[in-house]
Amino acid sequence: MPALLAALQDKGGNVRSASATALGEIADERAVPALLAALEDTVDDVRRASAAALGEIGDARAVPALLEALEDAKPEVRGAAALALGRIGDADAVPAILAAAKGRSKDVRQMAVQALALLGDPRGAEVLRSALADRDTTVRFWGAIGLGSVGDGEAADVLVAALADADEVQRAAAGLALALLGRREAVSALGKLLPSEADWIAFAAVVGLGRLGTPEAMQALRGGVRRIQDPRVRRFAARVLETSCVEALIGEMRGEDRVFRSYAAQALLFLQDPGALPALEEARGDRDATVRMAARVGVRRLRRPPAQAVPAAPATGQP
């Protein structure tokens, strides 16, 4: 790490940016003071990389500086700061992230809405509902996931409507969100996504059905296993049917396949099952950066006091 800290003072902006990124991957809290100073760098990408690195480290000391970075002139820096605040999980940052999510910059909205999804704070529900109508597909995706993450039962109707979206990605996000809300309307939509050519969409469909865990959902999964194209997803589905969704995800996160370890870590982040905490703590040392990041955020969220849930509105079809 000393060499990376020294590189953060290099004359070359590219070197400083690369150093900040590497320090984030290491996630050593001793780098926080240097990265906080780098948030004032004259090079835009150094400020962006430093904000991102502070989010990966997850030290609450960075929150005040990251809140200031939300006012940076460059949208890429503001977006990185918003996502970093979501990853750190400080509830005091929610109002500022909400404001960023309403901004004109598409890049900032993408990061801010994702941050709200990671935080799972009910105060984000209204903005997340609005995100479903955003013209940007990434914003809509994270808006749907976020509504499931915050437990916004009042959003069920708009999520059900999103199941008819022409975009398979949006249907997957809406189906998974409904599954997080425990809504039976997700079963048919998720079952139809099992044969997807995109392995992550098929994986998400299995997670959603497993998360619901109802006889209807399990029957849809059993009936759809043979239609799953990717053998790795079929193997995962079989594990869900044999054990439980969380146990199957923990098994995947401890497996050899880097991509599926990443899928599993990200799924466990949003499922928020306390039984997964030891495995997520272990995964913070994974050799893959994406797995490590998801595991760190998942652990921080599980350790936070639970936020007050958004009250669910009565709706037909709710189990």
Image (cartoon, rainbow, N blue to C red):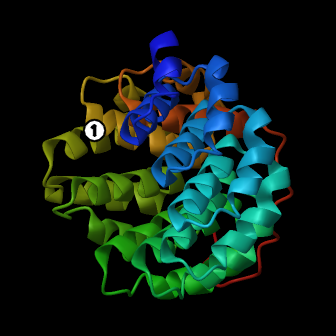
Q: Give the percent coordinates (x, y) of residue 214.
A: 51, 57
Compared across the picture, whether 137 is left or right of 71 comes to: left
Q: Give the percent coordinates (x, y) of residue 279.
A: 53, 23
Which element carries disc 1, helix, strand or loop? Answer: helix
The foreground one among 44 and 116 is 44
Q: How many C-alpha atoms fall within 10 Å of the one at disc 1: few (<14), some, or many (≥20)? A: some
Q: Residue furthest front?
A: 11
**Residue at left 51%, top 38%?**
294
**Residue at left 71%, top 49%?**
66
Q: Give the percent coordinates (x, y) of residue 115.
A: 62, 57
Is residue 307 shown to the viewer in this render?
Answer: no
**Residue at left 28%, top 67%?**
193
Type of residue at label 1? Val
State the image quarter where residue 36 is shown. top right
Is residue 97 shown to the viewer in this render?
Answer: yes
Q: Does 230 sit above or below residue 308?
A: above
- Residue at which label 1 appears: 259
Q: Does 159 sit above or below residue 52?
A: below
**Residue at left 56%, top 72%?**
109
Q: Give the percent coordinates (x, y) of residue 312.
A: 77, 73
Q: Residue furthest top?
A: 2
The foreground one among 248 and 91 is 91
Can you say which quadrant of the picture contains the C terminus?
Answer: bottom right
